[in-house]
Amino acid sequence: KVCPPGSYCVAADPCSANITVPRDCPPGYYCPSGTAQPFSHPCPQGTFNNITTRALPSDCLPCPGGLYCDAPALSVPSGPCSAGYYCTLNATTATPRDGVT
């Protein structure tokens, strides 16, 4: 039995690999069909995901302009840009020097 999208499945009984218990994929991650561990697929740097049961990389939201997302697996943006800097969509640092990140 394949674990459904948006969930991860762990064996309910170590002696029986055919029995699984679906659990919600945690915020900051996405779980495609067949995911066995909750932290296998983190949202990439520059994105975040504050909702459980996400199944696709595209379910990770781009970090909004004015904020930055400096690590993978974030459930909320890291924070606002530093004073004097402009963060665009998907910024990965509070002090972007290239006008993009």
Image (tube, grey):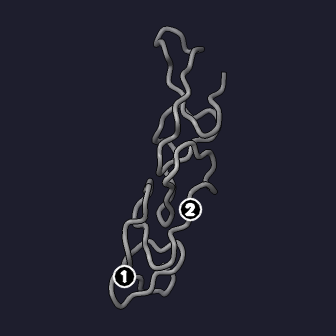
**In this picture, is 25 found above or below 84?**
above
Q: Amino acid at mark 2?
A: Leu
Between residue 18 and residue 81, name the one nearer to us.
81
- Residue 48 drawn above or below residue 87: above
Q: Residue at x 62, y 41 (%)?
A: 32
1 relative to 80 in the view: left or right: right
Residue in the foreground of this view, choosing between 52 and 71: 52
Q: Amino acid at mark 1?
A: Thr
Q: Position of residue 38 (x, y in %)?
A: 47, 37
Indicate whether 52 appears above or below 34.
Answer: below
The answer to whether 93 is drawn above or below residue 84 in the figure is above
Residue corresponding to mark 1: 95
How many numbered tags mark residues here?
2
* Mark closer to the chain start, 2 or 1: 2
The residue beneath circle 2 is 61
Percent across and percent down for residue 30 are 55, 46
Mark 2 against mark 1, which lies toward the viewer?
2
77 and 100: which is toward the camera: 77
Locate residue 92, reporting x and y percent: 44, 71
Rendering quarter of residue 8: top right
Q: Residues within 10 Å of mark 1 (few under 14, many from 20)?
A: some
Q: Residue at x 54, y 28 (%)?
A: 9
Residue 44 located left or right of residue 34: left
Give the farthest residue toward the bottom: 84
How far from the left and from the top, in percent, is residue 39?
Answer: 45, 42
